[in-house]
Image: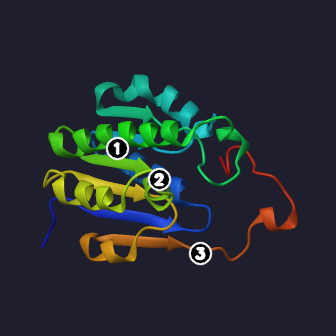
Amino acid sequence: MKKDSLVVVFTGENKGKTSAALGLLARALGAGQRVCWASFIKSWPVSEDKFFERIQPVFGERLEFYKGGKGFYKAGDLSAAGVSEAEHQRAAQETYDLALAAATSGDWDLVICDEINNAAADGLLPPEKLKELIERRMGRTSLCLTGRSFPDELLPLVDIATEMKKLKHHFDDGFVAMEGIDF
C-alpha cells in the first residue's frame, strides 16, 4: 500500500533538523518534484541561503525559497536585536500564510516549513496553526515541519516524527558554530 503524501516532523533540541529537511529537498528535486521552502526564524545569512541561490537557476519554477524570519525570539540571540514582538509575529504570520497557500494550492509536491515548530512554541504562531497546516494541505502535497518543541498532541496527525537527541556537541566544549556544518 502506498500513500499519496506524508507529513514529516524533525524536532528535538539538537542539530540536524534543517539538515534532514535539506535531504528531503534534494530527494524530492531529484525525483522531479516541485518544492517550496519557507524559513520561519533564520534571518541571518546561513549556508542554505547560498545553496538555494546556486541551485535556483537549475530548478527554476520547481523550487521556491522564502526567507521570512526575523531571528530567534525570546532566546537572547543578537541576530534579532531591535526586532519588536509585533514584527516577529507579523513575519511569522506572513511566512505561515505563504506556507499555507503553497500547501493548499496543489502546485507543490513538498512544502518544507523550516523552524515553524519554534515559531509555534515561542508564541509567534498559535499551535493551532500547525494543525491547520497539516489538515488543510492538498492530499498529494507532502509537508515537512522542523524546529524544536513539536506539540505531542499533534503527533497522531503526522506520518513520520524524528527527534534529534544530542549525544555530544562541540558547543559543550566551548566551540562556536562552524559554517557549512552548523549553519
- Callout 1 crowding tier (Cα within 10 Å): few <14, some 14–19, many ≥20: many
Query: What kind of element bears circle 1?
Result: helix
Classify residue 167 as left or right of residue 32: right
Amino acid of disc 1: Tyr
Residue holding disc 2: 119
Classify residue 98 as left or right of residue 53: left
Classify residue 176 as left or right of residue 66: right
Q: Position of residue 131 (x, y in %)?
A: 27, 62
- The label on residue 87 is none
Going by the picture, which residue comes out furthest to the top?
57
Residue occupying image coordinates x 39% and y 64% = 9
Q: Which is nearer the N-term, disc 2 or disc 3? A: 2
Q: Position of residue 120 (x, y in %)?
A: 43, 57
Res 158 quadrant in image: bottom left
Q: Tell me the CA gap for discs 1 and 3.
A: 27 Å
Q: Position of residue 91 (x, y in %)?
A: 45, 37
- The label on residue 165 is 3
Residue occupying image coordinates x 55% and y 38% = 70
Q: 140 or 77: which is nearer to us?
A: 77
Classify residue 63 as left or right of residue 106: right
Res 33 quadrant in image: top left
Observer-side mark, 1 or 3, equals: 1
Give yes or no for contact between labels 1 and 2 (Cβ–Cβ under 8 Å).
yes
Q: Position of residue 151 (x, y in %)?
A: 40, 71
